[in-house]
Image (cartoon, rainbow, N blue to C red):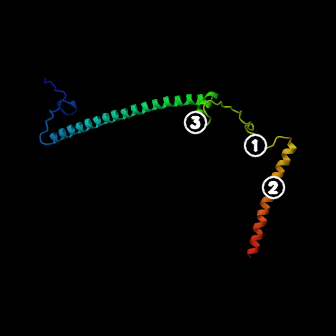
Amino acid sequence: MTQKQYGTGPLFTGGPPIRQKTGWRPVVRRLAFYAFLVVMCVRIGLAFSLYDESSDEVRAKEQKLKALKIEHRRVRQQLKYLDTEEGREVEAQAQGWIPPGSRLIVLPPEESPAAGANPHRKAGTARETLQHLAEETIDVFLQCRGRIVAWWAGFRSEK
């Protein structure tokens, strides 16, 4: 009984051994494979260098963001201070709006109409409001009528 040699033939059937190819084709294949490996190594190296550069940019932008947040916090604190009576007085003196040694008198703000209220509406009864609106409407109508009549008169005189 002969001993079978597995892996030496096509599909491991124990057929005749696979002969080694000779000539220039295996050399070209190996060179192409090595060239592929070199290209891939170079590309991977470039990817890592780009990653390193971008991480430097990210670090720089993070530092800038941190500095801007600190500046923002400082400005907010300054605004809170300027909203106080003392802050307004100090800033007015710094700007030269009031002479040193004088005292600032702050008047209360004027009352504005309530939110959502019609600013044209006058305080009063409903009848007074309707009468006011009617007068405004008649005034607008008469102004428009006067313009139309003047235009028509000019138009007719041109003929």
Residue 101: give x, y in percent of width and height. 62, 29
Q: Label 2 is placed on what type of residue?
A: Asp
Specify few, some or many for label 3: CA neighbours under 10 Å numbering under 14, 14-19, or 20 or more: few
Q: CA distance from mark 1 to mark 3?
A: 35 Å
Label placed on residue 95: 3
CB atoms of marks 2 and 3 within 8 Å: no
Q: Give the residue drawn at x 59%, y 33%.
A: 93
Secondary structure found at label 2: helix
Of the image marks 1 and 2, the number of the one nearer the N terminus? 1
Of the image marks 1 and 3, the number of the one nearer the N terminus? 3
Q: Label 1 is placed on what type of residue?
A: Pro
CB atoms of marks 1 and 3 within 8 Å: no
Residue 98: give x, y in percent of width and height. 62, 35
Residue 77: give x, y in percent of width and height. 56, 28
Q: Which label lies toward us, 1 or 3? A: 3
Q: Which residue is mark 1?
A: 119
Q: Give the residue drawn at x 16%, y 39%.
A: 26
Specify few, some or many for label 2: CA neighbours under 10 Å numbering under 14, 14-19, or 20 or more: few
Label placed on residue 139: 2
Q: Is residue 111 left or right of residue 46?
A: right
Q: Quadrant of the N terminus?
A: top left
